[in-house]
Structures are given as C-alpha cells and as structure tokens.
Amino acid sequence: MASTFALVGAHALLLRGTEGEPVADARRTPQMDAFHEGKRMLLQPPQEGPLAGLPDLPRDISPQATATYIRDVLDGRLPVPTPIALQVAHILREVSRPATTGTNRPSAVSTP
C-alpha cells in the first residue's frame, strides 16, 4: 500500500492491519504513517514489547455486549482506550491540515 500511495501522490493514512483487517486495536498502538502528495511521514511508531497493561474491555464479545461497550465509550461513561484515542487524534490532525496549493486531487476524507 505504501508504494501505491507514494506512486500516485496520495493523501492518506496507513495503519498496519490486524489479521489482514484495518481495525482500531484497543490493546496496542500500531504504526501510523501519513502520506502527503505521496511523501511518507511517520506519525506514530508501533508499540513494541509486551503490554504493560490492558484496557478494561468486556469479556463478553457478543454483538449486544460489544454495542453496549461502544455506546458507553461514546457517551463518556467509559474511557476511550489509549491506542484508539491516539488514532483518532492523528486522523483529526491530518484532516485539518490545509491542502497545498499544488494539490488538485480530491480529498479522501472531507471535513464538515
């Protein structure tokens, strides 16, 4: 993916996937790279080594329990796991960057 983003001069955010799926892992911070006109910039190095602690995640992984957990986080009743909060912060920072004058490609993400 990184080679493709560089080749086409993309504006993108690249994260390592979990078992092939791009997900926000609540336990570990992945490496995050931004591409601006195809130039790669490291935003966040990967969290290395053993985990010092785990976020308080529900043991029940049923759809109902997962939905309840997500709703509690979104409503502020439970804290956002740090790896997810970092990912959101990087995304918000990247979409708030002004486009360079030479950029004529459509944005992958539009801001309200």
Image (tube, helix red, strand yellow):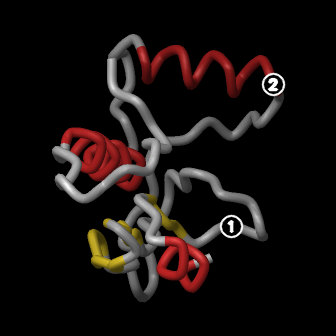
Whole-percent x and y of residue 1? 62, 76
**Residue that label 1 marks:** 18
Of labels 2 and 1, the one closer to you? 1
Q: Give the mark nearest the N terminus, 2 or 1.
A: 1
Residue at disc 1, secondary structure: loop
Left or right of residue 101, residue 28 in this image: right
User: On the image, which quarter does residue 74 sit in?
Assistant: top left
**Residue that label 2 marks:** 63
User: On the image, which quarter does residue 43 sit in?
Assistant: bottom left
Q: Residue at x 39, y 64 (%)?
A: 53
**Residue type pointed to by label 1:** Thr
**Residue type pointed to by label 2:** Pro
Q: Nearer the viewer, residue 79 or 35?
A: 35
Whole-percent x and y of residue 24? 54, 51
Query: Looking at the image, is 60 positioned above or below residue 48?
Result: above
Left or right of residue 102, residue 11 in this image: right
Q: Residue at x 44, y 50 (%)?
A: 105
Measured in 3D between alpha carbons, the distance from the residue under mark 2 to the one under mark 1, in whole angstroms, is: 19 Å
Whole-percent x and y of residue 102? 24, 59
